[in-house]
Amino acid sequence: MAVIGKPKNARMSLIDEDVEVLVKNNPIYRGYAEAKTMTAAMRKKKLREEERIKATYDLPPMTTKFIKKIAKDESITQSQIANCLLVYAINNYLQGNVHFEKEVLKHSPRYDYKIVPPMIKTLKEDV
């Protein structure tokens, strides 16, 4: 029995057309749909990009000014300076050397407190 509207050499899809439409429109399965159309080189490039970890944080202008100044003085990228300073801060926190000044947030459904780093108050005078 011949299928009308499809060439003889066309491969039959293993997925029902309705299911395929749902998969294409559902963000959960979007990666699957993209992977189907990607070449091996494109998949490899995407994996490399996903492995590269990036994070974005809201920092006070004074903090970014100091990161820029230190990076310029040391002739190192701002990213490496920020990473190094964060590692120092995390190590100090884990050793119990960092204590946060907490303020209660009244109108935040997600968080109970905000902190004001004491370091920023003293650094403002140095810039």
Image (cartoon, rainbow, N blue to C red):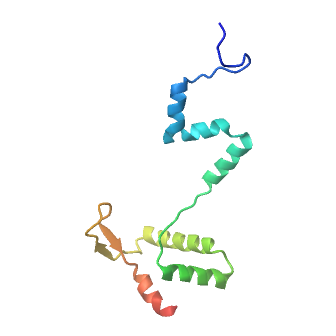
The residue lying at 65 percent from left, 85 percent from top is: 73
Number of numbered labels in the structure image: 0
In the image, 9 versus 117, the foreground residue is: 9
Residue 110, horizontal then vertical, whole percent: 32, 60
Q: Does residue 56 lie above or below 97 as drawn?
A: above
- Most extreme residue toward the bottom is 125
The residue lying at 60 percent from left, 84 percent from top is: 69
Residue 89, horizontal then vertical, whole percent: 48, 73
- Most extreme residue toward the top is 1
The residue lying at 68 percent from left, 19 percent from top is: 6
Residue 49, horizontal then vertical, whole percent: 64, 53
Quadrant (top left, top right, bottom left, bottom right) of the N terminus: top right
Judge left or right: residue 125 versus residue 103: right
In the image, 53 versus 95, the foreground residue is: 53
Q: Does residue 35 lie above or below 53 as drawn?
A: above
The residue lying at 33 percent from left, 77 percent from top is: 101
Residue 53, horizontal then vertical, whole percent: 58, 58
